[in-house]
Image: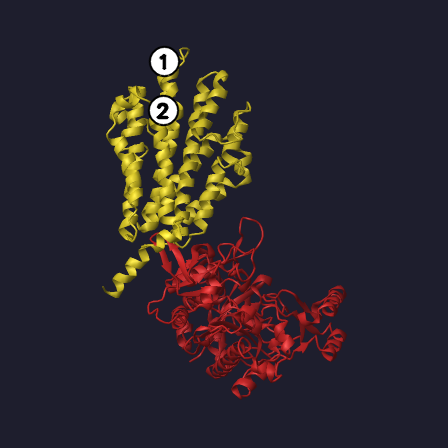
Amino acid sequence: MSASHSVELDTLFGDYTLDQAFDEMRESSGDLRPQYRALAETLAGLPSDELQRRKQSADLAFLTQGITFTVYGREEGTERIFPYDLLPRIVTAQEWDRIERGLTQRITALNLFLRDVYSDGKILNDRVIPRELVYSCKHYRRPMRGLQVPRNVYIAVVGSDLLRLNNGEFVVLEDNLRVPSGVSYMLTNRRVMKRTFPALFQSYGVRPIEYYPQLLLSTLRSLAPEGRPEPNIVLLTPGVFNSAYFEHTYLARQMGIDLVEGRDLVTHDNVVYMRTTDGLKRVDVIYRRVDDDFSDPLIFRPDSALGCAGLFNAYRAGNVTVANAFGTGLADDKAIYAYVPRMIRYYLNEDPILLNVETWLLNEEKDRRHVLANLDKLVVKAVGESGGYGMLIGPHSTARQREEFARQIEANPRNYIAQPTLDFSRAPCLIGDRLEPRHVDLRPYILFGDKVNIVPGGLTRVALEKGSLVVNSSQGGGSKDTWVLG
Amino acid sequence: MTVSNQRVREGAKMLSRVADSLYWMSRYLERAENTVRQLDVTLSLMLDTGEVDFDARWQRMVAALGKPVGMDWNGSIEAMSKRLVYDSLSPASVIYCLNGARENARQVREEISSEMWQRLNRLYHQMHSPHAQSQFASNMNDQLATIVDGIYLFKGTTDTSMIHGQGWQFIRLGRYLERAYSTATLLEVYQPDLFQPSGSESAGHLYLELVGLLRCCTSFEAYCQVYTADLSPDRILEFLLLNRDFPHAIHYCVDGTRQAIEGIQQTGGRRPPEELKAGIGKLSAMLGYTSISEIISGDAAGFLHTIREQCLRIHELIYRYYVHYSIQSALAV
C-alpha cells in the first residue's frame, strides 16, 4: 500500500475563504470558474506529497539555473530566487482579447502623447493637459524637444500593471515606460511550469510566449537607423551590481546579442562603437536598461560613469537608435497617468477600453483637502517612484506615518497622488500544502516596433503574505505563470 | 558567404572588457597559486634551519613575490603567514588574488561555464569562512593544500568545460604570462644564493635549498626525470629557464603565450598584432638561442631582469591591441 493518498478538493481548499475581492478561481457562490475546473481536479487527484515534491523540484530548477535577483546591501552581493508559486493564473481568451485591445490603444496614445509633447505640444495648447504638470515632471527631458525619433517610436518596450477589481474588470494601475523589468521571470516561469505540470499544460491549450526574445529582437531591428540593413544590436546594462543583472544577461543570451556596459562604448563623430578585441565595431541599436539620468554624462548626470559620453548626440544625429527613447518617464508619471483616458480621446477619438484607477491630484486644492481628510482610507504615492517605494497604504499605516506623509504632501503637493485602497483580485496559491487566495496583479509586456505586439500573458505578481497588497519583488512579492487560453 | 558562416565569424570576437576580465581572472589565480606554493616551501625550509635565518628567508620570499609592502618580517611565522594568506587589504595576499579572480569571473558569467563558476565560488567561500581563518595557525599546511587543489580543479574544469575560443585563449594568455613573470622574478631573487652560497651552509642544507627552489615551481620530480636527482644550480637554472616541455619553465610559458596570441588572431585578423608578435618572438628567440653557460658566465641577473621587462612589455602590447587601444588607431583600419 502506498502511504500517500488523494487529497479531496475540500481538504485542499480548507482555508480558502472568499471575501469581497474578486476571486480568480471561484465565483462568489463558491463554485469553480469553468477555466479552473481541470486544474483543481488535477490538484485534488494528486497524492498529497506529490504537490510538495513538484514544488521542491521547481524551486531547485530556479536555484541551479541561477535565476536570481540581487538584494542590495553588503559587498557579498546576496542573490535570491524570486519566490515562485506553483499554480498558474488563468486568463480566458475573451478576457485577453479585451486586455490586448485596451493596451494597444493605450500604448498608441501614450506614444502619440510623447511625440506631441516633445514637438508641437498640441495637447498642451488645447489645454487638455495642464502645461505646468508636464514641465514640472522630473522625468521631462528638455533635450528631447524637437528631436526626430526613429519611426516616431518612443516606447518600444513597455510593461503595464493591471489589476482586476471587484466587478471583474481589469484596470491599469500604472504604465512602466522607462526600463520595465521582469520579463525574464515570465519566460522562466513558463519553462519551469511546463516541466511541473506537462500533461495539464498540454490539455489547456495555453498560448505560447516563448518567442518574446525573438519578437524583442525584431522590434529593435525594425527601429534601426536608415541604411543599416544588418544592424549591430546590443543590450546596455548598468553592470553586475544592478538588481536585474540576471535578466540582462538572460535576454542578451536569448537574443544572441552582446551585453555591454557604458565603458564598452565610445563615440566618435557622433557614431557609437563598442570596443572588441578586433577593434571598434559600430553599434546601431541599443536596448537600454540604464535610466536616463545615467546614460550620458554630457547631457544628464555628469557624475555618472554607467553610460557613454556622447551617446545622446549620436542619438540626436540619428546614427544610433536607443530604446526606449529618453524622457519617456514623463508619460508614466503618476500625475500624468490621471490624464491618459483624456489622451486616448484626444489623439484617437475613442473611448478607453481599459480604465484607470480613480486618482486624486494633490496639487489641486479640492482633491488635496479630500485626501488629507481621508489619509487612513487611501493609498498615497510619490509620482516619480516605482517598485513600491515612496508609498503610503492608508488602512495599513500608523498615525505617525500618516502625519509624516501629510507634511510631505503640504510641502510638495505636485509630488503626490492618491488612489482608493483597491480590493484587487486574488488567485489560488500553494501555501504549505493547502490552497489559499492571495492578491495578484498582471504585468503584460508590450513591444512597439512596426506595430504594437503583446505576447499573450505576462508576469502575474503575487503578494505572498496573507492580506498584503504589495506585489513588488523588492517588498516580498512572488510570481506565477500566466496562462492565456487559445 | 552563407549566413551561418557569418554568425560564426562574428561570434568569435569578443568585447574588450570581457577579454580583459578573463585575462585578469586567470592572472589572479596563477598569482594566488604561486604565492601559496612559495609560502609552503618557505615554511618547510624554516623547519630545517635555525631561527637565525627566518628573517632573511622571509625577506627573500617577499622579494620573490615582488616586494609587496606591509609584509616585512615581524618575528612571528603564524602572524606573517596569516597576513600573506588572509589579509584582504594587501594586494599580495592569496585572498586578495582570489577575490580579484572571482570578481572578474562574476562580470563575465556568460562567457565561462557554470562548472567553472561553481568551482571558483566554492573556493572563494572556503577562503571566506571564519572557521578557516581562525583555525589557520593549527592547520596551515592543510589549508594551503586545499587552496592549491581548488585552483587546480578550476584550471582542469576550464580546459574541459569551456569552448576553446577566444575567451579561453585569453585565459591561457593570462596564465602563461603571469607564470613566466613570476618564475623570472623568483630566479632573479634566488640566483645570487645559488652561485655564491655562504660558506657556513652544510651540503644537506644546500640540497634542501635547491629542492625548495624547484618545489616553488612544482618541478622537482620533472627535473629528476631530465637530470636525475643530481642537483646543480646551473642545471636547475637551465631547466626552469630553457626547457620547452615543462609547463612551469619560462620558455614553455613564452611558447604558450605565443600560441594564445595566434589562437586569438585566427578568430580576428582585422588588425594583425605585428608588434606584439615581434615582442613575443624576441623573447622566445632569446630563450631559444642562448645556452645556459652563456647566461651564467655573463650577467644572469641582467638576463632574468630582461625577461621580466619583456613580459611587462608584452602585457602592455596586449592591452594596446585588444583592450585600451586608441580610437584613432582602431578607426584607421
Q: Which quadrant would the C terminus of chain B be assigned to in this image?
A: bottom left
Question: What amino acid is at disc 2?
Answer: Ala
Horizontally, residue A6 falls left or right of residue B301, namely right
Above or below residue B251? Residue A352 is below
**In the rendered image, the vertical position of residue A182 relative to residue B26, given as above or below:** below
Q: Chain of mark 1?
A: B
Label for residue B144? none
Residue B121: where, in percent of width, then height?
46, 46
Q: Nearer the viewer, residue A194 or A260?
A: A260
Q: Is residue B319 above or below residue A415?
A: above
Residue type marked 1: Ala
Classify mark 1: residues with Cα within 10 Å, few (<14), some (14-19) or many (20+). few
- How far apart are the alpha carbons under marks 2 and 1? 25 Å
Q: Earlier in the sequence, mark 2 or mark 1?
A: 1
The quadrant of the image that shows the N terminus of chain B is bottom left
- The answer to whether any part of residue A415 appears in the image is yes
Front-lying residue, B234 or A363: A363
Q: Measured from the top left, where is residue A123 in percent x and y?
A: 58, 82
Question: In terms of secondary structure, where does tag 2 sit?
Answer: helix
Identify the residue position indicated by label 1 in the image: B203
Whether callout 2 and callout 1 share a subunit is answered: yes
Rendered location of residue A264, percent (x, y): 43, 55
Identify the subunit bearing mark 2. B
Tell whether B247 sits left or right of A12: left
Name the foreground residue: A461 vs B283: B283
Please give the letter of the chain rendered in red.
Answer: A
Q: Which residue is mark 2?
A: B301
Which color is chain B depicted in?
yellow
- Local crowd size for mark 2, using a 10 Å CA cut-off: few (<14), some (14–19), many (≥20): some
